[in-house]
Image (tube, grey):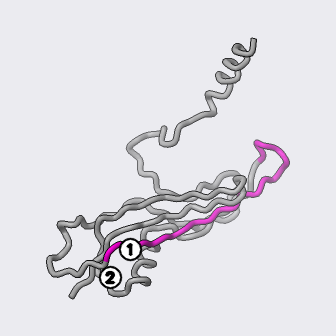
Amino acid sequence: MKTLLSVILLIALAPFAAAAGEEDGDEAMPGLIPASGILIFYKSEGPLSFVTMTPKDVPADARRLGTVKGVSCQHGLSIPLAANIRATNATGGYGDGSFRQALAQMQKKHPEMAGIYDVRTDLRILSFLGLYRRLCTEVTARAFARP
C-alpha cells in the first residue's frame, strides 16, 4: 500500500519537476534575476556573451599581471501578497550584474591593465526563503599590461 501511494505521489508531482536548462538548447541564458507576479520595479542588467582573447592573442611585448577578478551583482525582492503557497507576489529587481560592470571593477583595482585573456565566468545565486535573491556574475581572468 505504501509503495502504491508513493508511486501515485511521484506521478502527481512529475509535471512540476523540470531540470535546469530543459528548455530549448539554442537560446542564450542571459543571467537576469528572475521576476514573477506583479512587477513593481525592475532595473537590472545581466551578462549575455563576451568575446575575449586567448593566450596566443596576447601581444608579445605584454607584461603579464596574473589573475584578476571582478564581481557584479543584481538583487531581487519578492513579497507575497497573501498567506498562501501559490499567492501572487509583488517583485522588484535592481542591479548591474553585467560583464561591463565586472570588467570596470577589474580596471579600477588594476589601473595598469590593458587587456584580459583566458576568461572564466560563474553565476552565483543566493536566495533567502525566496524573498530576497542575489545573482552575481564573477569574472576571473589573466591580465596583461602594455610596456
How far across and how far down the image is residue 130, in percent? 70, 53
Q: Residue at x 60, y 55 (%)?
A: 34
The residue sitting at 39% across, 81% down in the picture is: 107
Q: Which residue is mark 2?
A: 113
Q: Which corner quadrant of the image does residue 1 belong to? A: top right
**Element under disc 2:** loop
User: Would residue 136 be found to the left or right of residue 40 on screen?
Assistant: left
The front one of 75 and 107 is 107
Q: Is residue 28 left or right of residue 73?
A: left
Q: Which residues are magenta?
A: 66-87
Q: Which residue is mark 1?
A: 68
Badge 1: how crowded within 10 Å, few (<14), some, or many (20+)?
many
Q: Secondary structure at mark 1?
A: strand
In primary-sequence order, the first of circles 1 and 2 is: 1
Q: From what the image shows, is residue 87 above or below residue 9?
A: below
Asked if residue 39 lies in the magenta stretch, the reply is no
Instruction: Locate residue 28, reporting x and y percent.
Output: 42, 51
Type of amino acid under label 2 = Met
Identify the main secondary structure in magenta.
strand
Q: Is residue 50 above or below residue 105?
A: above
